Image (cartoon, rainbow, N blue to C red):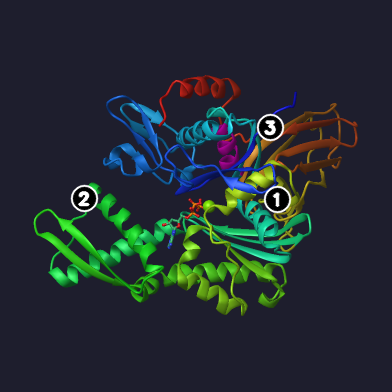
């Protein structure tokens, strides 16, 4: 009798498309197609009115009614106040994402059997709340989430595995919703992230909006009247604009036929040049972020051995041209730029490689700090672990108590780079009760440790009394589901028909 090998899978839960991959017995990762026969599942959910079915994927994309269709939910993963109401029922971004993951889980089970453990990827610049929401979404979908991995790390693993990419690697990931720039050091069987930078709301869906504006402008020029963009028409034209955009990656001129209610069919001609011109501002921003990232590391473009492409939007010829110009060499593309994150995540799930990463945020505490110039003390954010420190790591900082007879030492744990407390998030608190009757000036050490699952623990140590207190940081923000709620909602989602 032989044991069936466990099914470890990797999932790229993307803004516009999601993918699931596993590792074959020969050690190579492969995409598991969904039940509709597609390798990429559009991250779109359609709420059916008649039978309460939740359609996920292409069927949802073509679902017809924009008011019942949810897209790009990933852009809201860090927003606890964002809810979508359909048929009197409220849905959070976590729950919508759970529906997408549940479809992937179900479809995958038909082909390779039930999933044992999963690694889900997130953009490197996702904050703690969004990472937690992603883990919760997986659990609501009935998945055992082994860990969360940064998308560029997964992609680098895939490139290292398939293309033998080694040395200093820059991953340029331009997807549907975000841009991620990551510099990694890749050796034979080891990947170290040196730095990760990104921009939210910069990706393919922004290009679609811009192309739609261009179409409307051309239409106005040719027909002397405005395109009427009610929500239904707008949705339809945005979908058409996306198709046109993809064609413009291959052709120099395409024409777009637009059916208008009152005036019949109109034809608009679009050129690649005009499109690339219209998105120039956004592309320039991606180059600036690139320069900034390389600069932060003290590198020159020539210090980068390989630039690798990730994300569907890197198929735009201008993107590749800009990168070639900037680095003086062409970027490496594996072709399936929209699948490589899932494929790398599968390698990760199988623990095929050792990977080290960096903290995506700075962690610190609020402390009274004297201003050298004025002599006044002000509450500032004192950073203990700076962003981009390699993880796992553990760092400490000692502070002095400022008041006599303090009995309760309260430490506020912050996430964010700013010195100004107004611009950082307080993500946890520790209160340590100490014996009475102490003078000011006692040393208190605050330590943070950050493990490879991007989980943060904090400890306060009072030297005078020898007392210490240690907590795992559970993001206190609104919108984090308590354990019993996860169980209840997961049971509820199980009853929903997802197709
Ligand atoms: N040939 C192409 N030319 C231009 N854009 C393309 C092409 N193919 C796909 N895209 C665009 O790529 C985007 C999707 O890329 P991808 O699937 O990598 O994103 P995602 O993973 O969903 O997003 P993110 O990584 O931001 O969460 C879409 O906006 C799509 O229109
Ligand atoms: Mg992506």
Q: Can residue 174 be found in the magenta stretch?
A: no
First in residue order: circle 2 vs circle 3? 3
Badge 2 residue CB within 8 Å of ligand 1: no
Kindly report the distance in space between the C-alpha atoms of the residues bearing marks 2 and 1: 44 Å
At x 59% / y 74%, what residue is drawn?
330
Q: Earlier in the sequence, mark 1 or mark 3?
A: 3
Which residue is under mark 3?
6
Q: Which residue is mark 1?
A: 359
Give the number of the mark in front: 2 or 3.
3
Q: Residue at x 33, y 62 (%)?
A: 244
Q: Residues within 10 Å of mark 1 (few under 14, many from 20)?
A: many
- Residue 440 or residue 140, whichever sits in front: 140
State yes or no: discs 2 and 1 in contact (Cβ < 8 Å). no
Mark 1 residue CB less than 8 A from any atom of ligand 1: no
Viewer-proximal residue, 324 or 377?
324
Q: Residues within 10 Å of mark 3 (few under 14, many from 20)?
A: few
Query: Which quarter of the figure has residue 227?
Result: bottom left
In the image, the segment drawn in magenta is 128-138
Point out the image quarter for the N terminus: top right
Does residue 133 show up magenta in the picture? yes
* Magenta segment, prevailing SS (helix, strand or loop): helix
Label 1–label 3 contact, CB within 8 A: no
10 Å crowding of disc 2: few (<14), some (14-19), many (20+): few
Name the outermost residue toward the left.
262
Q: Quadrant of the C terminus?
A: top left
User: For this view, does 288 lie left or right of residue 229?
Assistant: right
Residue under the point 29% across and 67% down: 214
Could you tell whether 247 is left or right of 97 in the image?
left
Is residue 50 visible in this depiction of the protein? yes
Spatial CA distance of label 2 from label 3 is 50 Å
Q: Which residue is mark 2?
A: 230
Tell which circle, 2 or 1, labels the residue nearer the N-terminal end. Answer: 2
């Amino acid at each position: 009798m032989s044991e069936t090998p466990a099914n470890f899978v990797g999932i790229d839960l993307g803004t516009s498309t999601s993918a699931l991959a596993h590792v074959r017995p020969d050690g190579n990762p492969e995409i598991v197609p969904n039940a509709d026969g597609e390798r990429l599942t559009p991250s779109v959910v359609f709420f059916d009115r008649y039978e309460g079915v939740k359609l996920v994927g292409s069927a949802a994309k073509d679902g017809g009614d924009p008011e019942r269709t949810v897209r790009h939910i990933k852009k809201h993963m860090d927003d606890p106040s964002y809810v979508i109401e359909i048929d009197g029922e409220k849905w959070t971004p976590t729950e919508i994402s759970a529906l997408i993951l549940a479809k992937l889980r179900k479809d995958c089970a038909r082909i390779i059997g039930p999933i044992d453990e999963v690694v889900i990827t997130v953009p490197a610049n996702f904050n703690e709340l969004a990472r937690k929401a992603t883990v919760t979404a997986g659990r609501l979908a009935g998945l055992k989430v082994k860990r969360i991995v940064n998308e560029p790390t997964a992609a680098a693993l895939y490139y290292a595995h398939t293309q033998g990419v080694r040395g200093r690697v820059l991953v340029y990931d331009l997807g549907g919703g975000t841009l991620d720039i990551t510099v990694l050091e890749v050796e034979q069987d080891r990947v170290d992230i040196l730095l990760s930078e990104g921009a939210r709301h910069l990706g393919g869906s922004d290009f679609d909006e811009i192309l739609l504006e261009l179409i409307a402008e051309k239409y106005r020029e040719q027909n002397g009247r405005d395109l009427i963009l009610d929500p239904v028409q707008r949705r339809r034209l945005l979908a058409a604009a996306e198709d046109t955009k993809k064609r413009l990656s291959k052709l120099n001129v395409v024409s777009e036929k637009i059916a208008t209610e009152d005036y019949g069919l109109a034809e608009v001609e679009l050129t690649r040049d005009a499109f690339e011109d219209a998105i120039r501002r956004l592309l320039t921003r991606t180059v600036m972020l690139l320069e900034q990232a390389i600069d932060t590391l003290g590198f020159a473009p020539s210090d980068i051995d390989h630039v690798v492409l990730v994300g569907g939007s890197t198929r735009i010829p201008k993107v590749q041209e800009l990168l070639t110009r900037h680095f003086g060499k062409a970027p490496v593309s594996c072709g399936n730029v929209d699948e490589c994150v899932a494929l790398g995540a599968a390698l990760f799930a199988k623990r095929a490689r050792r990977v080290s990463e960096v903290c995506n945020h700075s962690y610190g505490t609020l402390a009274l700090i004297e201003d050298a110039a004025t002599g006044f003390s002000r509450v500032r954010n004192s950073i203990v672990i700076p962003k981009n420190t390699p993880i796992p790591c553990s760092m400490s900082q000692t502070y002095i108590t400022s008041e006599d007879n303090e009995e309760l030492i309260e430490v506020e744990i912050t996430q964010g780079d700013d010195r100004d407390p107004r611009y950082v998030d307080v993500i946890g608190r520790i209160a340590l009760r100490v014996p009475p009757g102490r003078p000011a000036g006692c040393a208190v050490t605050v330590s943070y440790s950050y493990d490879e699952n991007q989980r943060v623990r904090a400890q306060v140590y009072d030297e005078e009394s020898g007392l210490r207190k240690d907590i795992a940081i559970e993001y206190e923000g609104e919108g984090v589901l308590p354990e019993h709620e996860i169980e209840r909602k997961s049971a509820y989602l199980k009853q929903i028909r997802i197709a």
